[in-house]
């Protein structure tokens, strides 16, 4: 019998979610302004975005209900610093409906800065009280 825990054939190297974009160029620029880099793009509306070694696929595809229910948690060292970073990136209205809320301490043990990308995807910049 094969032990799935020690067999390299079952090793997982990465898990990447797909994130929607109503305006691909605007969304890509929004994430880049926050520090993500485009590692790869197909030139037709798909880009692999990376921040701190973590990645997601940004795609030029939009369904309102999906976008408004899509969320990413980004675990950070300082949620307040992320609030400042997102706020400064949003000046000038370049990113349409993108917005950010003040950091909030949640009962479940974290301070979170909630931000919405240009098409409504909710980002949780989460600083846990204890590691």
Image (tube, grey):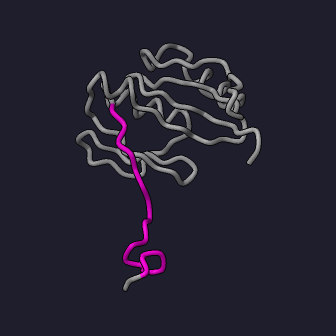
| Magenta-highlighted residues | 3-20
Q: Quarter-wise, where is residue 45 in the image?
A: top left
Quarter placement of the N terminus: bottom left
Dominant SS of magenta comes to: loop
Is residue 120 inside the magenta stretch?
Answer: no
Task: Give the image location of residue 47, x and y in percent.
Answer: 34, 45
Q: Position of residue 121 (x, y in %)?
A: 42, 27
Question: Is residue 52 depicted above or below 92 in this figure?
Answer: below
Q: Is residue 92 left or right of residue 128?
A: left
The residue drawn where x is 65% and y is 31% is 82
Place residue 73 in its image quadrant.
top right
Image location (x, y in percent) of residue 130: 76, 44
Q: Residue drawn 41% across and 22% down? A: 120
* Front residue of this view, candidates 1 and 110: 1
Picture residue at 52% right of the left edge, 31% below the top: 123
Identify the residue at the far bottom of this view. Answer: 1
- For the view shown, which residue lies furthest in the left direction? 44
Is residue 31 positioned above or below 17 on the image? Answer: above
Q: Residue at x 48, y 48 (%)?
A: 50
Q: In the picture shown, does residue 5 fall above or below 90?
A: below
Q: Nearer the viewer, residue 53 or 12?
A: 12
């Amino acid at each position: 019998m094969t032990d799935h825990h020690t067999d390299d054939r079952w090793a997982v190297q990465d898990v990447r979610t797909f994130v929607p974009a109503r305006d691909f160029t605007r969304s890509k620029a929004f994430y880049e302004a926050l520090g993500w880099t485009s590692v790869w793009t197909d030139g037709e509306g798909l880009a692999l975005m990376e921040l701190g070694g973590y990645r997601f696929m940004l795609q030029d595809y939009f369904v309102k209900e999906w976008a408004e229910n899509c969320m990413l948690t980004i675990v950070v060292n300082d949620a307040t610093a992320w609030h400042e970073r997102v706020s400064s990136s949003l000046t000038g209205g370049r990113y349409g409906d993108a917005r950010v809320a003040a950091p909030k301490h949640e009962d479940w043990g974290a301070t979170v800065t909630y931000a919405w990308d240009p098409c409504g995807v909710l980002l949780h910049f989460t600083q846990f009280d204890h590691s």
